[in-house]
Amino acid sequence: MWRERTSGLRALRVSAWVLVGAATLWWLPSQTAPAYAQGGSTKSQVAARLAWLSDELQLNPSQKQKIQPFLGNLQHQLMSIQGNPNLSPDQKRTKSLVAAQGAFSNIRTVLNPQQKTKFDSMKEQAINRLAAQKAAQAPPPGQK
């Protein structure tokens, strides 16, 4: 019975990680990952994400101008959350997820129907990629 409970808890934790990871990292393209990983300025990180999103969704200048503050605010919120030593990892995941969901819903309001479809598809692909990565990292059943 304990094994069933712990495996259920493990599945719940993996699901939470997948959702948070997808929510916070789905827009990070592989071509900008090195610049992001090098810890560039917040403005350069936002600019890189906006450029990638613009290329993927074919954003017009007006849309770019409207989306940029959403990305900047999300970046600021995520940095604040991750840098807060008073939050537990679970609290950080929860707060990051809420911040990302808010930014994503704001971004969707700026998009046209075709862009919304592509945007949703991109999020779904990111979730699937992260789920596959987590599954590959998970220990085999019966091991901790």
Image (spheres, rainbow, N blue to C red):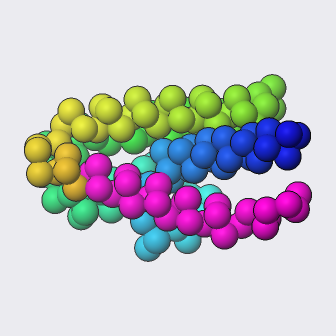
On the picture, is 109 further left or further right than 97? left
Q: Nearer the viewer, residue 141 or 19?
A: 141
Quarter of the image where the N terminus is located:
top right
- Residue 109: name its quadrant: top left
The residue at the point 19 percent across, 50 percent down is 117
Q: 77 or 122, which is in the foreground?
A: 122
Residue 56 appears at what percent x and percent y? 25, 63
Residue 135 painted magenta: yes
Residue 132's x, y, as percent? 56, 66
What x and y, as percent, mark residue 99?
49, 31
At x 66%, y 41%, the residue is 12
In the rendered structure, the answer to whether residue 94 lies left or right of residue 35 reads right
Left or right of 65, for residue 36 = right
Looking at the image, the residue that sits furthest to the top is: 86
Q: Residue at x 66, y 70 (%)?
A: 136
Is residue 44 visible in the rendered structure shown here?
Answer: no
Span of residues in magenta: 119-144
Membership of 88 in magenta stretch: no
Whether residue 90 can be seen here = yes
Q: Which quarter shows the C terminus? A: bottom right
Q: Position of residue 129 (x, y in %)?
A: 49, 64
